Amino acid sequence: MRILLEILRREHAGAKPYVQCIPYETDDAAATVATALRQINADPGTVDADGAPVGEIRWECSCLQKKCGACAMVIGGVPRLACDARLSECGERVRIEPLRKFPVIADLIVDRSILFENLKTMQLWMQEAAAAEGRAVDTAYEASRCLQCGCCLEICPNWYAGGVFFGTAAIVPTSRLLTTLPDAVQKELRRAYRKHLYGGCGKSLACRKVCPAGIDIDGLLVNSNAIAVWRRRRK
Ligand code: SF4
Ligand code: SF4
Ligand code: FES
């Protein structure tokens, strides 16, 4: 299999971006974008389509098993995980870019700290009394599968870094606490949900289509809206 990787590169934050086209060849039918990036970086003799040397391509990865979310990037125009993007599905050439809604640090690495700042604003880490039982266990488990990869924010028409609307990457973990916290200690969380999550969501569910974890986002949204907005329990 031969494929031309068109990689949008930047030496550092603020540097002028440029596209480097790198021919890649492999016999591995299961090779992914992550496979290609690792092999290119491991071979100091790699040259691009113009014969120029390819310097190390900066990108993030950890698990290589679709579990950590670190390798999220835009591949062929779609936000997805590099370790989940089979080259065999990409055609003869594919554009690879960093997530576009976050500040670029270098090449394919972006600063996603706004995700965690938003979770801090929701005070999700301060809740001690949460306990799941009955059907809430299923909801809590589903919510816990979020990778905080940011793919849903990349595709969302209503989310931008620093905005009041925190997007699906906050909706999902918040839904776990709305389902498991006792009613008596939910007042502030419900208020934050209505302010930062409910109001800004247009319910297009574009986020569901790209979520690499396949999370039941609409199910969690319906459940959380019922609890935080309509004050009903729907587990
Ligand atoms: S909801 Fe899905 S797309 Fe969004 S951050 Fe979590 S795992 Fe990533
Ligand atoms: S449903 Fe639409 S508006 Fe709401 S978080 Fe998902 S992509 Fe954004
Ligand atoms: S490296 Fe962990 S999800 Fe791709």
Image: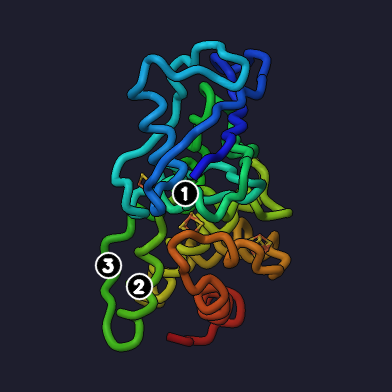
Q: Amino acid at mark 1?
A: Leu
Pointer 1 with pointer 3, Cβ within 8 A: no
Which is nearer the eye, 94 or 164?
Answer: 94
Q: Could you say where residue 182 lies in the image, as x and y percent from the top left?
A: 35, 76
The local secondary structure at tag 3 comes to loop
177 left or right of 89? left
Disc 2 residue: CB within 8 Å of ligand 1: no
Residue at 44% x, 19% y: name it. 46
Residue at 60% x, 82% y: name it. 230
Q: Could you say where residue 218 lies in the image, as x and y percent from the top left?
A: 57, 75
Disc 1 residue: CB within 8 Å of ligand 3: yes
Q: Within the displayed image, which quadrant is ligand 2 positioned in?
A: bottom right
Q: Which residue is mark 1?
A: 81
The local secondary structure at tag 2 comes to helix
In this picture, is 96 found above or below 57? Answer: below
Q: Residues within 10 Å of mark 1 (few under 14, many from 20)?
A: many
Q: How many marks?
A: 3
Q: Could you say where residue 215 lies in the image, as x and y percent from the top left?
A: 46, 69
Which of pointers 1 and 3 indicates the residue nearer the eye? 1
Q: Amino acid at mark 2?
A: Ala
Q: Amino acid at mark 3?
A: Ala
In this picture, is 206 found above or below 57? Answer: below
Which is nearer the eye, 40 or 163?
Answer: 40
Residue at 43% x, 53% y: name it. 84
